[in-house]
Image (cartoon, helix red, strand yellow):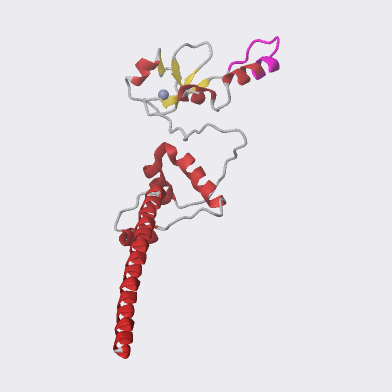
Amino acid sequence: MPDQMTSVFGSDQAPHDLFARSRAEHAGAVANLQPLKSDYLCPHCEHPVMIFPGRPGFTCQGNSSHHWEDMEELKRLNPKQVAVAQRTVKQAGHVDVTVQIPGALVEQLNARYGKKLGATLAAVLRNLADEESLMVPSSDKAQIGIWLGAKIANSGELKGLVFNLMQMKNQVQAELTAVRTAVQELDDKGKNYVERRLKEMLRG
Ligand SMILES: [Zn+2]
């Protein structure tokens, strides 16, 4: 639903439902229209700018002589916009969770994730619930990065680096086995030679 519509109707609920409910409540009566709040504050006195039924255009709630015929006219005066709380589309079966965290942390998180903060937190919580998942603190990540000789941006990169290490280890193991076999063969040759010479000397 467009933001404009959400702010006018004050909820994520489809306006259709509101109209249907209103019609049922006011069946047969003259519609009891309520003024609608716009997203703007009066550029003169900072009261909310409203849309009053029966009066076209935009009107200040604090002073009805503060009036604008259309949005363009109002916007030319650079009205302050109402801080609109971040709205997220609610998914079926999802619930809101409230946690207390330091205000500075919220600012940090907002600066880093912006609009994606909600979805990011949900993903992190999903990981927390999965007892097999692993969270790596930055100090451990830095140490692993030093050992692997690479900067690790995410778990996919870490997986790739560990895979490379595993392949290297398999390769080294195969080479070591080949060297051991070669040494064993040389050793056997030497022993066989000495034994043969001894037998010859004893016979002679
Ligand atoms: Zn005003």
- Up the image or down, 28 lies above or below 133; here it is above
Which is more toward the observer, 3 or 194? 194
Question: Which residue of the protein is positioned furthest toward the front in this rendering?
Answer: 204
User: Could you tell me which residue is drawn at 54 percent across and 27 percent down?
Assistant: 10
Look at the picture and state if 9 lies above or below 70.
below
Quarter of the image where one finds residue 116: top left
Image quarter of the C terminus: bottom left
Residue 132 picture quarter: bottom right
Kindly report the secondary structure that dominates the magenta region of the rendered protein. loop
Residue 76 as seen in the image, left or right of residue 125: left
Q: Of residues 143 and 42, which is closer to you in this image?
A: 143
Image spot of residue 69 (x, y percent) = 40, 12
Up-down: is 29 above or below 181?
above
From the top left corner, tell me how far across and down residue 99 is, in percent.
Answer: 53, 49
Q: Is residue 179 magenta?
A: no
Residue at 57 percent of width and 33 percent of height? 91
Asked if residue 49 can be seen in this view, the reply is no
Left or right of 98 in this view: 140: left
Q: Position of residue 120 (x, y in %)?
A: 46, 43
Expressed as whole percent of the image width and height from the top left, the position of residue 126 reads 54, 46
Q: Quadrant of residue 42?
A: top left
Q: In this orientation, which residue lies closer to the viewer: 3 or 146?
A: 146
* Residue 22 is a magenta residue: yes
- Residue 29 visible in the current orientation: yes
Q: Quadrant of ligand 1?
A: top left
The span shown in magenta is 21-33
Give the number of marks: 0
Q: Residue at (68%, 10%) from the top-left corner?
A: 29
Who is closer to the viewer here, 69 or 135?
135
